[in-house]
Amino acid sequence: MAKQFPQIDVAHQKFIEDQHMFFVGSAGTEGRVNISPKGMDSLRVLGPNRIVWMNLTGSGNETAGHLLDVNRMTLMWCSFTTRPLILRTYGTARMVQTGDEDWAEMAQQFPDHRSARQIYDLTVDLVQTSCGYAVPFMEYQSERDTMQKWVDGKSDDDIRAYWVEKNQHTIDGKPTGILG
């Protein structure tokens, strides 16, 4: 059965920190809903109602475009190991980009990564847990090195050119605000 909480408690935070992957859900007032898997060392719980996560370069940039329209966001974690559990955090988020005044302070929370596009700062207003009984067992092997290999083969200018080419608009044609 689903249970709801006004904030992230200690057990929730431990569960979040134990997961290797999370999903972000966002949507504008019109257009498609986006659900995207995220991994690597890119998320921090900073308090009972605050989560920040670093968004690395990808083939799309839907969350950024959605937040320029509507600032709501949902994050979800699933246990694929022994304890069946799904945890979602709901709230409002703001986007911090590389040129923003508080970028350096926020980026210090994470390992340095040349392909970092944005940091999302989520204010959590609801936490919900549910059973996850139908989620399959899966075994974690390791992080992929594909992103790092891609970055290692690019200059900073190449990465920014990729943002201009691939990340300036959502799939619905809305601007994302990415800095080229």
Image (cartoon, helix red, strand yellow):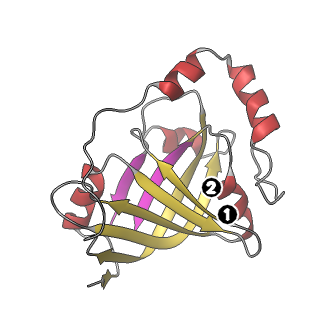
**Picture disc at residue 67:** 1
Label 2 crowd (10 A; few <14 / some 14-19 / many >=20): many
Of helix, strand and loop, which one carries label 1? helix
**In the picture, residue 151 is in which quadrant?**
top right
Mark 1 and mark 2 in contact? Answer it, CB < 8 Å: yes
The CA distance from mark 1 to mark 2 is 7 Å
Query: Can you give x and y, in whole percent of width and height, for residue 116 in the image?
Result: 58, 36
Q: Is residue 180 visible?
A: no
**Bounds of the magenta span?**
43-55
**Circle 1 crowding by C-alpha within 10 Å: few under 14, some 14–19, many from 20:** many
Residue on which disc 2 sits: 95
Q: Which amino acid does label 2 sit on?
A: Met
> In this view of the protein, which residue sits in the foreground, 94 or 104?
94
> Which residue does the image show at 67% across and 45% down from the upper left?
100
Q: Is residue 105 visible?
A: yes
Task: Assess whether residue 44 is covered by the magenta stretch.
Answer: yes
Quadrant the C terminus occupies: top right
